[in-house]
C-alpha cells in the first residue's frame, strides 16, 4: 500500500526581500510503500531537510502534489496540517525536542493530549511505550536527569504514541556516542521489523546501510534511488 505519493514537488525560498530565489526542491517524484525503511542522503544544500519538513507537514511545497496516506496535504492550512501531524506522523529529532518541565511519562503523552485522548488512556499507552524503550524505571525523571541516549529513547516513544503511519527521523544519532547511537538504531530496526514505515535523513553511510532503500539528493533533485 502506498503511504506517500509525491509528484513534481518544488520548494522555493525567497531571500533578500524576494530578490533571490532558492530552489531547495526542484521537481521531485517519489513513492513510499507501507513498511519501507528509507534513508535520505546528500551533500549540504541538497534538499534533505527541506524534503523531510515537507514530508512531515512542517512546511508546504511551493508547487506539486503530496498525497499522505491517501489524502492530498499539499494545500492544507496550518490547522489542518497540525491535525495531520498529530494523528499520522511521528518525529525523532537530533536535538530530542523534549519539554524540560515535563517528566518522561508526560513527554511521551504530549501528542495524545493534543488529540484530546483521556488521561487514563494516555497514561496506559505512555507506560507501555516507556517500558518498550527501556525507560520503565525513569518515568518520573525530567529530561535534565537523563543521558542523551535516554532522552532519545523518550523521543522514540513519543514518536510512536499516536501509532503513526510514518516515522520521520532527522539525524537521530547525531548527538550520541557510537554505542548509544547503535542502541537507538537497534530500536529503529525493531520498529521496521514490526511493520512501521521509517524515513531517516542522515549523512552516515552506516546508518543508511540499515535502511532498505537509499535516496540520494543533489541540487533539489533525486540523483539516485537504490535498494539494499
Image (cartoon, helix red, strand yellow):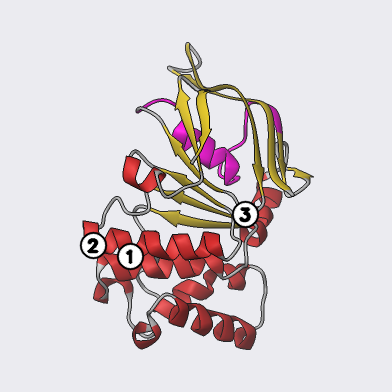
Q: Residues within 10 Å of mark 1 (few under 14, many from 20)?
A: some
The residue carrying mark 1 is 183
The secondary structure type at the circle numbered 1 is: helix
User: Is residue 187 at all visible to an observer of this figure?
Assistant: yes
| In the rendered image, the vertical position of residue 67 relative to residue 90, given as above or below | above
Left/right of residue 140 with respect to residue 117 in the rendered view:
left
Q: Rounded to the nearest whole Å, what is the CA distance between mark 3 and mark 2?
A: 26 Å
- Crowd rating for badge 3 (residues with CA inside 10 Å; few <14, some 14–19, many 20+): some
Asked if the magenta segment contains residue 55, the reply would be yes
Query: Is residue 53 a member of the stretch shown in magenta?
Result: yes
Describe the element under mark 3 as helix, strand or loop: loop
Residue holding disc 3: 35
Sequence order check, earlier mark of 3 and 2:
3
Find out whether the residues at labels 2 and 1 contact each other: C-beta distance under 8 Å. Answer: yes
Q: Residue at x 25, y 76 (%)?
A: 145
| Whole-percent x, y for residue 180 in the image | 26, 63
Task: Give the spatial CA distance, label 2 vs label 1.
Answer: 7 Å
Q: Mark 2 points at which residue?
A: 179
**Residue situated in front as seen by the camera: 109 or 213:** 213
Magenta segment: 44-65
Counting from the top left corner in percent of width and height, residue 36 is at 59, 49
Q: Locate residue 165, reporting x and y percent.
A: 65, 57
Residue 29 quadrant: top right
- Image vertical order of residue 136 relative to residue 7, above or below: below
Mark on residue 75? Answer: none
Judging depth in this view, the residue of 9 and 106 nearest the camera is 9
Amino acid at each position: 500500500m502506498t503511504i506517500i505519493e509525491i509528484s513534481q514537488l518544488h520548494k522555493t525560498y525567497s531571500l533578500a526581500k524576494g530578490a533571490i530565489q532558492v530552489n531547495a526542491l526542484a521537481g521531485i517524484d517519489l513513492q513510499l510503500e507501507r513498511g519501507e525503511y528509507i534513508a535520505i542522503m546528500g551533500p549540504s544544500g541538497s534538499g534533505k531537510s527541506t524534503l523531510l519538513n515537507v514530508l512531515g507537514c512542517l512546511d508546504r511545497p511551493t508547487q506539486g502534489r503530496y498525497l499522505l496516506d491517501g489524502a492530498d496535504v499539499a494545500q492544507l492550512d496550518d490547522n489542518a496540517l497540525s491535525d495531520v501531524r498529530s494523528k499520522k506522523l511521528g518525529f525523532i529529532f537530533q536535538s530530542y525536542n523534549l519539554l524540560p518541565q515535563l517528566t518522561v511519562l508526560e513527554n511521551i503523552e504530549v501528542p495524545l493530549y493534543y488529540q484530546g485522548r483521556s488521561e487514563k488512556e494516555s497514561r496506559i499507552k505512555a507506560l507501555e511505550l516507556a517500558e518498550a524503550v527501556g525507560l520503565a524505571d525513569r518515568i518520573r525523571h525530567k529530561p535534565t536527569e537523563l543521558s542523551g541516549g535516554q532522552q532519545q529513547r523518550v523521543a522514540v516513544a513519543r514518536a510512536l504514541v499516536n501509532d503513526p503511519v510514518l516515522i520521520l527521523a532527522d539525524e537521530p544519532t547525531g548527538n550520541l556516542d557510537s554505542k548509544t547511537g547503535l542502541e537507538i538504531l537497534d530500536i529503529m530496526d525493531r520498529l521496521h521489523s514490526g511493520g512501521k514505515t521509517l524515513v531517516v535523513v542522515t549523512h552516515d553511510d552506516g546508518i543508511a546501510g540499515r535502511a532498505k532503500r537509499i535516496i540520494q539528493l543533489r541540487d533539489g533533485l533525486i540523483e539516485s534511488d537504490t535498494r539494499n
